[in-house]
Amino acid sequence: MAKPTVQLPDWPDAWNSDSPAPETAQAAKQGTVIFIGGLGDGDQIGDDGIVSAYAKPFSDQHPNLDVQYFPWDQGKQVQDYVKSLPPGTDVSLVGHSYGGDTAAQVTQSLGQQNIPVNTLVTVDPVGHFWGDGFMSNVANNTDRWVNVQADPPSSNWSDRVAFWGDRVGADVKPYVDNFIVSPNNHEDFGSMMDTTPSGSQSPKDAVVGGIPAPQAAPEDEALP
Amino acid sequence: MKAKMRISTAIAAKPAPRMIATIIAITLVSLTTIAVSDPLSVYDEGLTATLIMKECKVDPSEFSLKDPSPEPKLRAIGDAAWRQLLAPLDEQDSAHHEENGHKADAELKKRSVADLAHVKELVSTKGCDALVPHARAVLESILQ
C-alpha cells in the first residue's frame, strides 16, 4: 500500500513529557506488544487499571514476547520505544479508549517515518478527528488493523463516559481488516480482547500471532 | 452567559435543603443557557456528573433517562466542545487543520483528566451521598 505523504504533525503538548523511553527489548524476544491505557488507567504495568492490570498477567503468560504498557498521554514515548527496537521486530500496538486513539496516532506518525506497525488493535477507541485521511494513513502503515466496538445489551457509566469523548464507533469500519462487535461494556477490556467472531481470530490471538504460550514447568522441576 | 454552578461549588458549604433546591434550580437554568453559548462548560459539567455516577457506582438502571439512547446527544456536546477548541487554532493556522484537530482533541482529553481528578477529590472529601443528587440533576438537565 502507498505510504502516507502528509507532513508529520507536532505531538500534542500532553505527549511531550521528558521521561525517557524504557530499555530496548531483549533480542531473544519474538515480538513486542505495547498496551496503551485510557482515561484513568494505570501509570505502569501491573497498576490497578483496566489495561495496566491486564498487561501484567499477559506478560507473565507470554515470556517470549516483550510486553510494555504506556498511559494514553505518552504517545511520544511509545513512538520512541518502537524506534529503539531492532529493525524487523514484530510490533503490535493495543490501545483502549483514549489509548486506542493514541495507538492510531502513533501508527500514523511511524508511517511517516517508514516504520511499520505489524498489528494494530484499537479497542473501543475514543477521540476526535478520525477523518478519511487519518484513517487511511493508519491503515496504510499496519499489516493488520483489528478494531473492537463495545455493544453491550445495556450501557453503563463507562459507556457514557466514552460517549462524552466521542467514541469512534463504526466510522472506522471501512479502514480496518477486522471489525469486531463485542457484547461488552466499554470498560470490559479483557472480555473484548477475547471476543472471537466466527471464522476469525480474537484480538488477543491476533496480537499473539499464533505463538503458543509455553507450558508451565512441572512442580518437581521448579526452582526452589 | 458564562455563569454556572459547578458541582463542587454547589456542595462546598453543605447548604440547607432549601438552599440546595435553589442551587439546583440555578444550575439547571445556567446549563440551559450554557448549552447554546459554551459547549466546553456543558462538557465539563456533564462529564463530571457522569464520572460521579461511575465513581459512586450508581446502578445505571436506577437512572432511567427520558431518552433511552443518549449517545448522539453526548457525542454532539463533545463534538461542539471540540470545535470550540479547534476554531481558534484553525483561525491562527488554517493550513494544518488535521494537526489542529488532534491538538484540540488532546486539550479536551486533558480537561477530562482534570475532571476525573476533580471527581476523585470530591468523592473522597464530600462523599457520594452529597454528590449523586447534584450529578443526577445535571445529567437530567443536559439529557432531558
Image: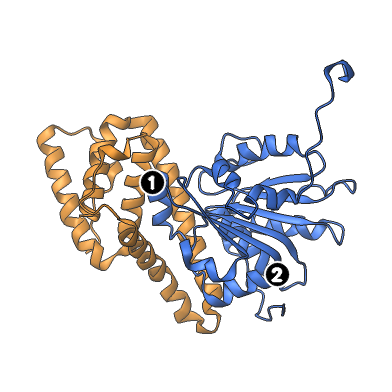
Query: CA separation, marks 1 and 2?
Result: 34 Å
Determine whether B29 is above or below B89 in the image. Answer: above
Chain letter matching colour blue: A
Q: Mark 2 points at which residue?
A: A141
- Which amino acid is tagged 1? Pro
Q: Residue B72 placed where, x, y %? A: 33, 62
Q: Residue A9 placed where, x, y %? A: 63, 73
Check disc 1 and report its element: helix, strand or loop: loop
Question: In this view, which residue lies farthest toward the left?
Answer: B18
Q: Mark 1 points at which residue?
A: A153
Residue drawn at x 17%, y 45% is B24
Chain letter matching colour orange: B
> Can I make out residue A20 in this image?
no
Residue drawn at x 68%, y 36% is A56
Residue drawn at x 57%, y 47% is A195
Name the image quarter holding the C terminus of chain B: bottom left
